[in-house]
Image (spheres, helix red, strand yellow):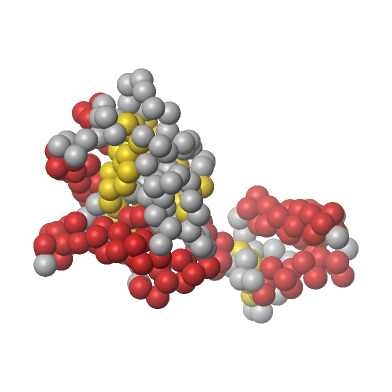
Amino acid sequence: MPQKRSITLQKSLDILDVFARNGTSLAVKEICQQVGLPESTLYRYVSTLTQRDFIEYEPSSQKYRLGVKLIKLGDIAARQLEVRRIAYPVMEELAQRTGETVLLTVRRGNSAIVVEAVESGRGGIKLAMNRGDLLPIYSCALTRPLIAYLPDEEVDFILRTNPPRRFTPYTTTDLQEIKNELNKVRRQGYAYSEQELTIGAGGLGAPVFNHSGDVIGTLCMAGSLHHITKAKIPQFVKILLKSTKECSLKMGFKSWVRTEQARKS
């Protein structure tokens, strides 16, 4: 059964690749010629892809074209790549100014993925995260800004369907405590955590907004608690928020004044 599912998935992707190569609407016979399937078999694949909105049928031309689901996925992918491109030079400057490692995360479903990292060059503690790592979206300062601005019912659903897991003895797993931390992020505009992912490490994270006012990523400074001390936090927060503001403005966010006013209220 797993092998049959794998073949089905491969054939479905082959069909989508045909549309990608041709860049136009296609009739069933045209698709068959390029994927090497009989029409009777192809119709089964096409029917499933149509039901899931990956492709759609044009009655007037009797052809198929890419559907709205792929347009939506493409838009998400493009925005994630855009925030990475915009954030990278800002991250380099932030790492240079603070001497700390700087990371960028974006949301992927109910998880957060590390899409970029700029090492500080300073020796010391090894952070337990690298590019491509997936983390629970509520786990620490690196991820919490991604979920903090979501509607309460969506936050409740994520926490209910993804029970918190413990990475260290200091990881917050109590649901109410996590919600309190998310409320704090909204009030103050940044997240702070200590040793929740790595013993001896702490982090400061703040949201990056896009043109629609949605959180598109989190910029985070992470390093040893010997470097990110309580005394340095106000200074680091000021530098971090200046960096996320720069990224947000470049992403088209126009409501920074209203955001700051809401944070103070």
Residue at 47 percent across and 71 percent down: it is: 157
Q: Where is residue 184 in the image (x, y as percent from the top left)?
A: 24, 60
Q: Can residue 25 be seen in this view?
A: yes
Q: Where is residue 39 in the image (x, y as percent from the top left)?
A: 85, 67
Q: Position of residue 153 (x, y in %)?
A: 40, 75
Residue found farthest to the bottom = 59
Can you say which quadrant of the picture contains the N terminus? bottom right
| Viewer-closest of 247 and 141 | 141
Which of the 4 image quadrants contains residue 213? bottom left
Q: Residue drawn 39% across and 47% down?
A: 170
Residue 79 appears in view: no
Q: Which residue is drawn at 28% across and 48% down?
A: 192
Q: Is residue 69 above or below residue 90?
A: below
Count of numbered badges drawn on the protein: 0
Q: In this view, does 239 lie to the left or right of 7?
A: left
Percent coordinates x, y for residue 177 in the rendering = 34, 62
Q: Can you tell which quarter of the image residue 214 is in?
A: bottom left
Quadrant of image for the C terminus: bottom left
Residue 187 falls left or right of residue 178 = left
Q: Is residue 137 above or below residue 63?
A: above
Near-viewer residue (44 or 113) = 113
Q: Which residue lies furthest to the front in this view?
A: 169
Residue 42 is left or right of residue 177, and the answer is right
Q: Of 164 and 92, which appears nearest the observer?
A: 164
Q: Residue at x 15, y 66 (%)?
A: 262
